[in-house]
Amino acid sequence: MPIPATAAGLAEGVLQRRVPDVARAISWAESGDARFPELLTALFSKTGRARVTGLTGSPGAGKSTLTAALARKARAAGRRVGIVAVDPSSPFSGGAILGDRIRMQDLYTDPGVLIRSMATRGNLGGLARATADAVDVLDAAGYDDILVETVGVGQDEVEVFRLAESCVVVLTPGMGDDIQAIKAGLMEVADLFVVNKADRDGADRVVQEILQMLELGEHGAWVPPILKTVATTGTGIDELIGKLEEHRKFLDGPQGARRKSERTRMRIEGLIKEDFLRRVESLRGDSGALEAVAARVNARMEDPLSAARSLVGRIDRGFAAAAESPSSPSKKLPFSEFLSKESPVPKPENLVSRISHLGIAVKSLAEGGAFWDLLGLVEEHREEVASQKVLTSFRAVGESHLELLESTSPDGPIAKSIEKRGPGIHHLCVEVTDVRAALGRLKAAGVRLVNEEPFDGAHDCLVAFVHPSATGGILLELSEKKAKAD
Ligand code: ZN
């Protein structure tokens, strides 16, 4: 049977427990496939049955042997098992020596066991998201026990680990430095401690060190038990399963419910952060928006807080999303709603990004330009805007420009302006990110506009004028840079 290519088809395959479909669904989760959200929507109501246990510890702590021992016990009880390996050194990730994999051969060939490794290339929390999604797929596919094996180092791994219902930290004798690492990252996440390879010297000392840490640290109603195991011989595995069962019962109680909802909240927060960080990253590709703003901040033309706010506005309007995937410009989260709740003073979104130029009406460009040449503001660009019967000359002043305007016809607006008021400042132009949005807002407020529809101006811009009666006496030009592809 071919693997379905649609979310609906794949969801059906997962619910019917077809292994290739489950594997494909996890691949979608891992790669962040655009179809995955729809798939998760279809599957999520069927999740929540599985017991999810995380096992973490340094490479060499024997997590994989412990994972295998737990999996075999579950299989003996007739339960189906999903193993998700986020640890690159795990035999389940194919990272360990061949001997380890051979010892696990029974699990690889058991149709009631699905083994899946996740790439640890995750960034911006992507690994935790992908792993949580993979666990949901396995849960929906009817796997009763899901074992997630991670390396207990790095923020990413801790994020993955804490998504499990029961978090087991695995330690071994003779790894003193590890205790320190665990103290830093895993203490408040651990539900159970296992001292594996407990037949070796120093096992009791490790137990003592954990006990000391537990006394110093804070834990809630559940006090993490410390167990000793020898995973290779199966010693202590039944006790571990018993404690996991106890923890499961605790989670089903009122204090466990609070913890569960806290974990769910963390997962949602993580998704929001991931989405937002991705949008922030995409600003770099957004026609240099970030660089342009940085230049203005460096030049002390804008403070960093205002700059950040204007970029957040830009993200919100989907500029970044549009630049990233032109085919789906409408697919975005309403971040302004989310952020406006956080912001103490609600204020209208800033539509203006900078002063673009000051327009000066001159009798002739040669005559009017000579003065600015003296100051070193040389002409950069000259262009005729036929619709306005004007020849324009641009001179850069830092981030902004002077625009000298010479009429090409005695009945053009510049000729009329000079006739009425003489040469001089004619208009101010501000750059807006979306000229139609700006016009729409002004129109809704009853502002008198010269142009209700934008038209093509110089410099590949879309422009429209606002009447001086509305602005306090200045003819105002709104200008939006058109995309280069136009
Ligand atoms: Zn202008």
Image (cartoon, rainbow, N blue to C red):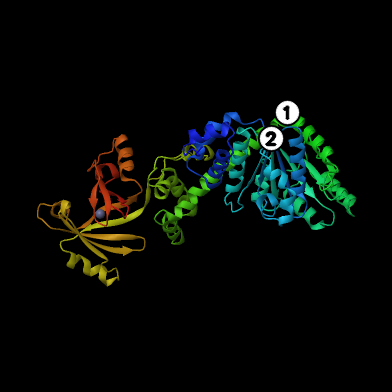
Q: Which residue is mark 1?
A: 252
Would residue 204 be found to the left or right of residue 470 on screen?
Answer: right
* Picture coordinates of residue 259, whole percent (x, y): 70, 34
Snapshot quadrant of residue 225: top right
Relative vertical location of residue 363 with respect to residue 350 in this rendering, above or below: below
Instruction: Judge from the rendering whether residue 125 lies leftward or rightward of residue 402; answer left or right.
Output: right
Disc 2 residue type (three-letter): Arg
Nearer to us in this view, 203 or 292: 203
Residue 80 badge = 2
Q: Secondary structure at mark 2?
A: loop
Please give the name of the residue rendered at 12% of the width and 58% of the height, measured from the top-left corner: 408
Mark 2 Cα-neighbour bin, 10 Å: few <14, some 14–19, many ≥20: many
Residue placed most toward the observer, 74 or 309: 74
Cα–Cα gap, marks 2 and 1: 21 Å
Q: Is residue 302 visible?
A: no
Q: Amino acid at mark 1?
A: Asp
131 horizontally vs 420: left or right: right
Q: Residues within 10 Å of mark 1 (few under 14, many from 20)?
A: few
Would you place residue 270 above or below residue 47 in this image?
below
Q: Which x, y percent locates residue 338?
A: 51, 38
Q: Nearer the viewer, residue 255 or 336?
A: 255
The secondary structure type at the circle numbered 1 is: helix
**464 vs 265: above or below:** below
Report the residue that reaches farthest toward the left: 410
Could you say where residue 369 lies in the image, as x and y percent from the top left? 22, 67
Badge count? 2
Please tell me which of labels 2 and 1 falls first in the chain: 2
